[in-house]
Image (cartoon, grey):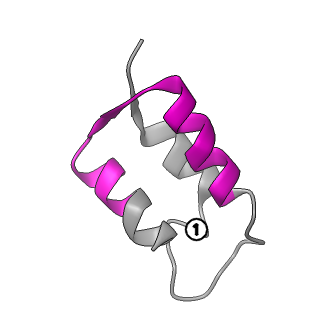
Amino acid sequence: MVDELCAILVKRQIKITQVERDLVANLLGQFNPPVEGYPYISDPDGVLSKLNVAT
């Protein structure tokens, strides 16, 4: 579910708040990349840099 959530947020460029971005970062931080078969979990820095965070 985490990989799918990240994929949707990145691909659809859904605007999220800084608090929500921090929650995503926390979720991704609970995995030890690379995680085979989960491209977004395997690239947490890439995911976080591509999120559409409201300023």
Q: Is residue 53 above or below residue 31?
A: above
The residue drawn where x is 50% and y is 65% is 40
**Residue range of the region highlighted in magenta in the rendering:** 7-28
Q: Residue at x 72, y 72 (%)?
A: 33
Are there few (<14), some (14-19), or many (20+) residues within 10 Å of tag 1?
Answer: many
- The answer to whether 18 is drawn above or below residue 36 in the figure is above
Q: Would residue 50 be found to the left or right of residue 41 on screen? A: left
Specify the principal SS of the magenta part.
helix
Give residue 8's quadrant in the image: bottom left
Q: Position of residue 3 (x, y in %)?
A: 47, 70
Residue placed farthest to the top in the image?
55
Q: Amino acid at mark 1?
A: Ile
Residue behind mark 1 = 41
Q: Quadrant of the N terminus?
A: bottom left
Residue 20 inside the magenta-drawn segment: yes
Residue 30 image position (x, y, % from top left): 75, 64
Using the image, determine if residue 31 lies above or below residue 23.
Answer: below
In the picture as drawn, the residue positioned furthest to the bottom comes out as 36
Q: Residue at x 65, y 81 (%)?
A: 35
Q: Is residue 14 above or below residue 31?
A: above
Q: Position of residue 32 (x, y in %)?
A: 78, 72
Q: Is residue 16 left or right of residue 21?
A: left
Q: Say left or right for 19 vs 54.
A: right
The C terminus appears in which quarter of the rendering? top left
